[in-house]
Image (tube, rainbow, N blue to C red):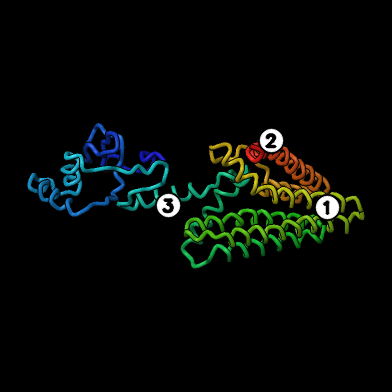
Amino acid sequence: NNPKDHLNIDDATKVLTIDHRIETIGKNLTDYNCIDTGIFICNPVIFDALEESISKGDEGLSGGVNVLAQRNKMRYLRLADNYWIDIDDKTDLKNAERFLCIKLKKDTDGPVSRILNRPISLRISKALLKTGITPNQISVLSCVIGLAGASLFFFGEYFYLVLGGIIVHIHSIVDGCDGEIARLKLRRTKYGGYLDSFLDRYVDAVIILGLTYGYWSISGDSMIWIMGFAAIIGSFINTYTGEKYDSIFKIRNGTGRIKFRVGRDVRLLIIVVGALTNQIPILLIIVAVLANFEAIRRLILFRNKLGNDMTDMHREFAN
């Protein structure tokens, strides 16, 4: 993070560092290469340094630090890319809230989550943050919303498809709030992630089953069951490979961002659009083809990425 993006540089305490030591520190420096976070670890010698700086008319902590810096007694620890912000007024507080929300965006977000869902879910999470609701409770609430929308698909009529599609899209947005709240409140747990994934699978299955049954009950076309089965299989395999795909390619690429990802956010948008346009067979075919194609693509990428690792391991074992 570049401090200039969210700090008042004119008011910030600047630091000039050379090698591993602090050369000088102060608000009025023109030659500097670091910004002071305001966090110091000092031993009692700082009090002698403060007395000396006060006698010279500098009553701030920076004055004592400067005295020690002149004696080559001050070292620094660079925070690198870790986020920090100095909050002195309401403007700083708003900046802190804004940057915390920016950091909630995940490197594994798909295009729909990144462009459509996340801007709305962040606003919801900011409101929910001031309540006592827990991330797991949000996961359950999101599941209930998703199942409510999915249940309407069973009727098959266009009115229920539209209403169900709108509710499913609301579910898709709210589904991101549990993780956002967990990260903001520092309440991330493995169980919470498992619960969210577990409930999402139920919602996915009922959505596709509802679309399939609703269309069949009106048209009588049995082929829709094959399409629905392929869509469910593809969705589940896509989800199963997703977490492994994210972890491997986040590490291998070294950038932290997944360059190409077709996940649940994309599938749900296809379902919503298909429901709103009353094109159930087409949406099931698209979901089935896209999800299964993505699963196969990941399998090939896994083979290319992990195949060499296995070869190296076998080579080491043989040696």
Q: With respect to residue 158, does 290 lie above or below?
A: above
**Residue labelled with disc 3:** 97
**Residue labelled with disc 2:** 304
Task: Determine the CA span between mark 2 and mark 1.
Answer: 29 Å
Q: Are marks 2 and 3 in contact (CB under 8 Å)?
A: no
Upstream in sequence: badge 2 or badge 3: 3
250 to the left or right of 302: left
- Residue 292: x and y in percent read 77, 44
Residue occupying image coordinates x 65% and y 47%: 244
Upstream in sequence: badge 2 or badge 1: 1
**Residue labelled with disc 1:** 229
Q: Residue furthest left?
A: 55
Q: Secondary structure at mark 1?
A: helix
Residue occupying image coordinates x 63% and y 38%: 316
- Residue 187: x and y in percent read 50, 61
Residue occupying image coordinates x 64% and y 54%: 172
Q: Is residue 305 visible?
A: no
Other residues around mark 3 within 10 Å, as few (<14) / some (14–19) / many (≥20): few
